[in-house]
């Protein structure tokens, strides 16, 4: 399968063009995207990757996108672009959470891991997963105050994976926290390929971002009593 993978969930995004099947995986092209440029650069970046590989959009066999958690604007740009491509090209879509991706990539089969991402404003995204053979089952996902999470961590006996270095700097958290490298669209593509091959696809028309929390616009628009 030839697949296109898009991640616009964070401050830095990326797009990957990959090829693979049940036994092989190859990165054909990988391009970085800077936050704040997604709306202007995502579509040209996709076109450049396809052109460099000598492929057209119609030769894609599937698409993969990160649905969150992360930047509200970034997620909207990535999801709307990929959803449009899927509907126009009639290609299947696999969705990957960045928390899930950390658990799959850095977790070990048969263990429960908790993945953490910086949510800004003194908060963290928290996802606990049961890790299988290249798969995960979500136990729970939430957003928590960083200070509150750190206070509870020593008593919970969790294996924590995070790209958030500040988390590991806390004396109360250091022993149970493993800082890992951020993932890019090629790693997301590898997970998405497994989902596509297994038929674990999403309906583009009904897909929405996994924000975990409401945006400021939604919060400020709530009726006041």
Image (spheres, rainbow, N blue to C red):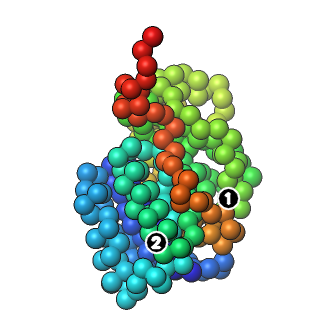
Say which mark, if any, is on residue 88.
Answer: 2
Residue 172 shown left or right of residue 218 in the figure: right
Which quarter shows the C terminus? Answer: top left
Q: Looking at the picture, how far across and down is residue 19, in whole percent?
A: 52, 80
Taking the spot 44% from the left edge, 56% from the top edge, the residue there is 79
Q: Residue furthest right?
A: 110
Quarter residue 85 falls in: bottom left
Looking at the picture, tell me which residue is in the foreground, 153 or 201. 201
Which quarter shows the N terminus? Answer: bottom right
Q: CA distance from mark 1 to mark 2?
A: 29 Å
**Closer mark to the observer between disc 1 and disc 2:** 2
Decide if residue 102 is in sight here.
no
Residue linked to disc 1: 135
> Which element type, helix, strand or loop, lies under badge 2?
helix
Q: Residue furthest bottom?
A: 54
Q: Residues within 10 Å of mark 2 (few under 14, many from 20)?
A: few
Query: Where 225 sits versus 170, above or below?
Result: above
> Which element type, helix, strand or loop, lies under badge 1?
loop
Query: Where 200 sits versus 121, above or below?
Result: below
Decide if residue 156 is in sight here.
yes
Quarter residue 122 falls in: top left
Residue 5 shown left or right of residue 100 in the figure: left
Mark closest to the chain's N terminus, 1 or 2: 2
Taking the spot 35% from the left edge, 46% from the top edge, the residue there is 73
Q: Looking at the picture, how far across and down is residue 11, in whole percent?
A: 33, 49
Q: Residues within 10 Å of mark 1 (few under 14, many from 20)?
A: some
């Amino acid at each position: 399968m030839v697949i296109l993978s898009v991640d616009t969930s964070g401050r830095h995004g990326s797009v990957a063009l990959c090829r693979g099947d049940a036994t092989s995986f190859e990165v054909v092209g990988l391009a970085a995207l800077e936050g704040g440029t997604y709306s202007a650069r995502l579509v040209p970046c996709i076109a450049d990757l396809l052109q460099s590989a000598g492929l057209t959009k119609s030769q894609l066999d599937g698409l993969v996108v990160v649905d969150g958690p992360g930047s509200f604007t970034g997620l909207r740009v990535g999801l709307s672009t990929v959803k449009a491509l899927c509907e126009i090209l009639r290609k299947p879509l696999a969705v990957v959470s960045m928390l899930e991706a950390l658990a799959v990539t850095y977790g070990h089969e048969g263990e429960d891991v908790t993945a953490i991402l910086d949510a800004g404003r003194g908060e963290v995204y928290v996802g606990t997963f049961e890790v299988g053979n290249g798969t995960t089952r979500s136990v729970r996902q939430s957003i928590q105050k960083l200070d509150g999470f750190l206070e509870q961590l020593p008593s919970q006996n969790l294996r924590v994976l995070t790209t958030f270095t500040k988390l590991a700097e806390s004396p109360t958290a250091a022993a149970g926290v493993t800082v890992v490298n951020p993932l890019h669209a090629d790693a997301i593509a590898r997970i998405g390929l497994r989902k596509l091959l297994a038929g674990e696809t999403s309906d583009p028309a009904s897909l929405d971002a996994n924000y975990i929390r409401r945006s400021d616009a939604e919060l400020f628009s709530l009726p006041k009593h």
